[in-house]
Amino acid sequence: MSVTIREVARAALVSVATVSRVLNGKGPVHAETERRIRKVAKRLHYVPHGGARSLITRKTHTIGVLLPDLYGEFFSEVIRGIDLCARRSGYHVVVSSSHSDRTETESMFRAMRGRVDGLIVLYPGTRPPVLKGNLPDGFPVVLLNAPRSRSFDSLNIDNFGGAFAMVRHLVSLGHKKIAFVTGPAENRDASERLRGYRDAVRACSADESKALEVPGDFREWAGYDACRAIRNIRPRPSAIFAANDAMAIGLLCAFREKGIRVPEQYAIAGFDDIPIARYITPPLTSVRVPISALGERATLRVLKAIEDGPRHEWREETLPTALVIRESCGAGARAEDPPAGGVRRVPSVSESHIGKNRQRLSG
Amino acid sequence: MSVTIREVARAALVSVATVSRVLNGKGPVHAETERRIRKVAKRLHYVPHGGARSLITRKTHTIGVLLPDLYGEFFSEVIRGIDLCARRSGYHVVVSSSHSDRTETESMFRAMRGRVDGLIVLYPGTRPPVLKGNLPDGFPVVLLNAPRSRSFDSLNIDNFGGAFAMVRHLVSLGHKKIAFVTGPAENRDASERLRGYRDAVRACSADESKALEVPGDFREWAGYDACRAIRNIRPRPSAIFAANDAMAIGLLCAFREKGIRVPEQYAIAGFDDIPIARYITPPLTSVRVPISALGERATLRVLKAIEDGPRHEWREETLPTALVIRESCGAGARAEDPPAGGVRRVPSVSESHIGKNRQRLSG
DNA sequence: CAGAATGCTGTAAACGATTACAGAAGTGCA
DNA sequence: TGCACTTCTGTAATCGTTTACAGCATTCTG
């Protein structure tokens, strides 16, 4: 069906070795022969078979990314970070997403064998998929968002610290009763943020109470829904910290419908600092998360693991988050926000690249 | 380095053929032998080499997706559609993203050879990358968002129709002067939406004027920025149609800061109907785009092309968009919006699955 | 009991590339 | 002319699988 190196060789009246040499630019080849081979290859639309090639070279120059079934901005942003970083080192990236259960993820590990040189794996929930046994021993893997492990590189975002800092900030504004809208129970980001909230409430001697914790699931409507539950809390909280921006936005929407003023009646804060956070009403106080930096760091580590081979040493790393204060919590620091059109991200290696070529397509 | 089928065979005291037969479940193998082989394979952490396997079977059971350097919700949503659909047919999906220039994209085509059975390609700009010559002849390819072509399957979203319908709607509300905030010039969605706007303005005999077209680039701050330009337009428009929701949100933000009321002073409409569109202030009138359906259709077509082989016939298809009317344009149809937590998407094959397993992770 | 059918296993040839090695042809030098 | 060296090219092994074919036991059938 598709043309092979052998057919090119035959048409150019040379051996496959010579064709290979020309196409890879190694070994001396007569100029005239080279010209002829290139012409034939182009005419026949010859494209080398990557699988066959990597079989013998034992290199795919590709790294794989395994993601759970997630959505939203995070997805594209982390892949962007990975992609840009990998490309700088001449690597391709393949992504496989939407793995909801263990079996699926494990089958994906196996499918990656022989197709990638290393793997970046974003942990889906609390239960880790089985890595050993589904990958060759010593295969380079970087775990994102994973509990600490002795046998793999791992990389985390400081969800705990971000949540802690936000609560401390709210307390510093005079809030004593701070409600918290949680994320989904099985989600690690969510549970770390909850932990940060709880520890900070205790540390800052704000009011502790299970009644202040309202269940959510990271989606807009969960925040919208939480409105009712929050208004029933007695004594009444003065601030609400949502475990992510989407829920904070849902909450704002519900308050507006009820005629409740933010931040006058309730201070509201989110987490993630998604791009629109500063454009909504009122601009949302949030915690900035270095998503594309996460992708970059992960890539650097997996490339290093590939380079180091079996002598690679596993490490754990945590990326810091940062408070972004806007009007929704009443601190009204609109001036601190970078000007429209300016930098609105944490500095990162790719900062200068961002916004140069990327385009928004249908949202 | 990593264990091969030969080592498993040696350790289990059988031939490679028998190991292969056991692991693929074909051919009769003595129960005792099978047990032994499985045990050894597990003990040695044997994972078959996908490249080698597909070399001989001529099947990768994988489809590739090539995306330009884009971001936002669209990215994850289209991949989701593809992934779910592919999985139902037992296919894996690999994505390669962030290709900004032609050379890069073409090198990616070549890298995919021998690693995927078919390709879904989202067109980056107006200039198509060269497909022939970078892929074997007759390779199954589905083009997304591409100009009509005789030699490939192609799939489009009805940007033109959506924009047209929105303008007609605004006119029906009594607006005569409708400003339009454009997307980036090289973007095809953007230019189709602009074309829809222009044609509709003419068809509905609203006021035509180049002055009503304000340049944008699909990002929030472009909408924010457009505020100034729009306020300088004389005579003053009464409605503003932004080429996507992100810009509409930026615009809303700028108006709020200036104390300008929406929809009283300006009616505003967006395009895409991103999830938060209904949660902002005021809820945003928009055009719903069947993103994941786009992914699904594309997958079905590429799978069909793979199945059909050389006898496959190329087709072109356009997916409809739909008006979603909310408060930002003054038609105040809040009641038409589905209730919070309910279905908020166009029906699609995967509708029932959505929201079951997906999780939002850090935004 | 002969011959066929069945069940299990091994040998070896692919798949499409890369590359070590060797050989052929040409050149330079004594 | 003979030898070494360079330049170019071809042969064949190799990567890790799958699978057609063959071979050997064993069981069935008439």
Image (cartoon, coloured by chain):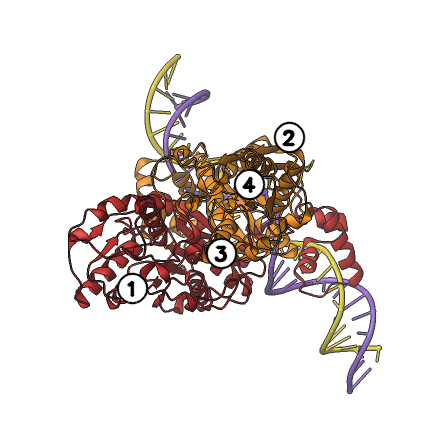
Chain colours: A orange, B red, C yellow, D purple
> Disc number at residue A313?
2
Residue holding disc 4: A58
Give me the C-alpha separation between circle 2 and circle 3: 50 Å
Q: Chain of mark 1?
A: B
Q: Nearer the viewer, residue A66 or B7?
A: A66
Q: Can you tell which of label 2 and label 1 is closer to the viewer?
A: 1
Residue holding disc 1: B166
Q: Circle 4 — which element?
A: loop
- Which corner quadrant holds the N terminus of chain A? bottom left
Image coords of residue B207 (percent x, y): 16, 60
Q: Looking at the picture, do discs 2 and 4 lie on one chain?
A: yes
Amino acid at dot 2: Glu
Q: Are marks 2 and 4 in contact (CB under 8 Å)?
A: no
Amino acid at dot 1: Met
Amino acid at dot 3: Ala
Give me the C-alpha separation between circle 2 and circle 1: 58 Å
Q: Chain of mark 2?
A: A
> In terms of sequence position, does the residue under pointer 2 or pointer 3 come before the other?
3
Q: Residue visible at 64% across and 30% down?
A: A313
Q: How many marks can you see?
A: 4
Q: Chain of mark 3?
A: A
Q: Looking at the picture, do discs 3 and 4 lie on one chain?
A: yes
Residue holding disc 3: A254
Image coords of residue D14 (percent x, y): 59, 42
Q: Can you tell which of label 2 and label 4 is closer to the viewer?
A: 2
Mark 1: few/some/many CA within 10 Å (<14, 14-19, 20+): many
Give me the C-alpha separation between circle 4 and circle 1: 55 Å
Amino acid at dot 4: Arg
Q: Nearer the viewer, residue B173 or B264?
A: B264
> In terms of sequence position, does the residue under pointer 3 or pointer 4 come before the other?
4
Q: Can you tell which of label 2 and label 3 is closer to the viewer?
A: 3
